[in-house]
Each structure stands twice: as C-alpha cells, then as structure tokens.
Image: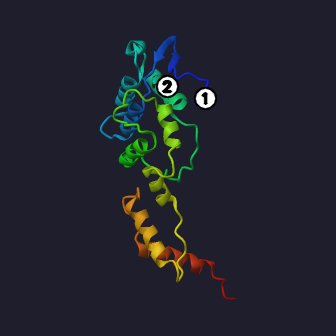
Amino acid sequence: MKLTDRLDDVIEYKGREIRLGLYFDVVLRAFELLKDEYFTEVEKIDILLQMFVENPESLAGLNIFEKNALVNIIFDQFIADGSTRASNEKPPFDFEKDAEYIYASFMYDYGIDLFEVQGKLHWKKFKALLAGLSDESKLMKVIGYRTMEIPPPNKHNAKERQRLIELKRYYSLDQEPQTVDEIDRKFENLANMLKPRER
C-alpha cells in the first residue's frame, strides 16, 4: 500500500478493462468460499469473478482457464499482502472465528462499525487498520494470550501459569485446547531431554 497510489482496482486483461470491487466484506466472503466444500473448483472460479468484477460484461467469451488465470491475478496482485509465513506456522487469528473480536476492536480503536461500511471500506484500507490496532483492542489482547510463552513451572509462579494456561485455552483457535497437565508434561519431557546423560 502506497499513499501516493490510488485505489483504482482495474485489470487490463486480454484487451479488456476489468473493474474490481475489492471491499473487505467481499474479500472475506471469498476466503469463506475457498474453504467451502459444496462447490466445485470451476463453480468457485465463476462465483469469485461474480463477486469481484463490477463490469461482468467484460468477462464475456473467456474460457475457464482464462478465468482461473484472472482469479489468480486478482488474489496475487490485489488481495495477498506479500508476506510469507512458514507453512507449518499457524496465523494468530482467524477472520471467521475472531469476527466478534475484530468488530469490537474496530469500534474501540476507530469508532468504525464494520457492518455499516460493508461495500464501502476497501480491502487494503481494512488491512491497514487491522494491522494498526492498539494493544488495548480486544483482538490484540487475544493474540497476545495465544502467542504468549508459558514460563517453566517453579515454586513462585503456579497461579500465574494457571491463569495464562486458562487464557490460552479459552482463546485457542485449536479444536482441542491443551490441558494444564499436558503442558506440564511437555515441560517435564523437555527437562528430561536436557539432563546430562550418565556415562
């Protein structure tokens, strides 16, 4: 995102000028569609283009391979943030599961009601505002709990560890959050692995 750029989402493709409406709610619905198992891949391509393209007549005559290429261009050049995340690294939040926290955070920090700006707030603006949420916003607090390291147990931190473990469990994105005993077992196993071996 450059402040000198205009958010003119237009693609020149196959001699056509294709106008896009990349509002945050449209993009989030597109993410939901990609995970939907009801539709075939071909159906998803057509639905995505219906969602994104504001002048659908510009798509006339395109075959499925050209449409697929166009969808890839839209995601790669207009939606993806360009960041790379390790394939085994889970993101600290989820647009669907954390929808309430995101909504509350935008209201808290910016006074923006996300329901009122559907079809108005551009995806890039939404992402910039999301990235700029304060540490006091609900979403950032939740992310803090999820990513916080639990200290190894000692005789002074039992209550604090219990509190952190309960917070991590409550706000976990996993289907099966870890129990206190499971986390303690991991520390015990790690401690045993680090013990010097007897010769």
- The residue identified by callout 2 is 69
**Tag 2 and tag 1, C-beta contact below 8 Å:** no
Which quadrant does the N terminus fall into? top right
Residue at the outermost right position: 199
Which residue does the image show at 49% across and 12% down from the upper left? 16
Q: Nearer the viewer, residue 133 or 148?
A: 133
Which residue does the image show at 49% across and 27% down from the upper left? 74
Q: Earlier in the sequence, mark 2 or mark 1?
A: 1
Q: Nearer the viewer, residue 163 or 94?
A: 163
Q: SS at mark 1?
A: loop
Q: Say the numbered circle drawn on residue 66.
A: none
Q: Residues within 10 Å of mark 2 (few under 14, many from 20)?
A: few
Looking at the rendered image, the disc whose residue lies closer to the viewer, 2 or 1, is 1
Which residue does the image show at 46% across and 23% down from the upper left? 65
**With respect to residue 19, does 75 lie above or below?**
below
Which quadrant does the C terminus fall into? bottom right
Q: Residues within 10 Å of mark 1 (few under 14, many from 20)?
A: few
Query: Is residue 90 left or right of 37 when viewed as pictured?
Result: right
Residue at the outermost left position: 38
- The residue identified by callout 1 is 2
Q: Position of residue 155 (x, y in %)?
A: 52, 83
**With respect to residue 124, does 101 lie above or below?**
below
Q: Position of residue 5 (x, y in %)?
A: 59, 23
Q: Position of residue 43 (x, y in %)?
A: 34, 29
| Amino acid tagged 2 | Ala
Q: Nearer the viewer, residue 156 or 39?
A: 156
Q: SS at mark 2?
A: helix
| Amino acid tagged 1 | Lys
**With respect to residue 2, does 100 lie above or below?**
below
Query: Is residue 97 left or right of 87 when viewed as pictured?
Result: left
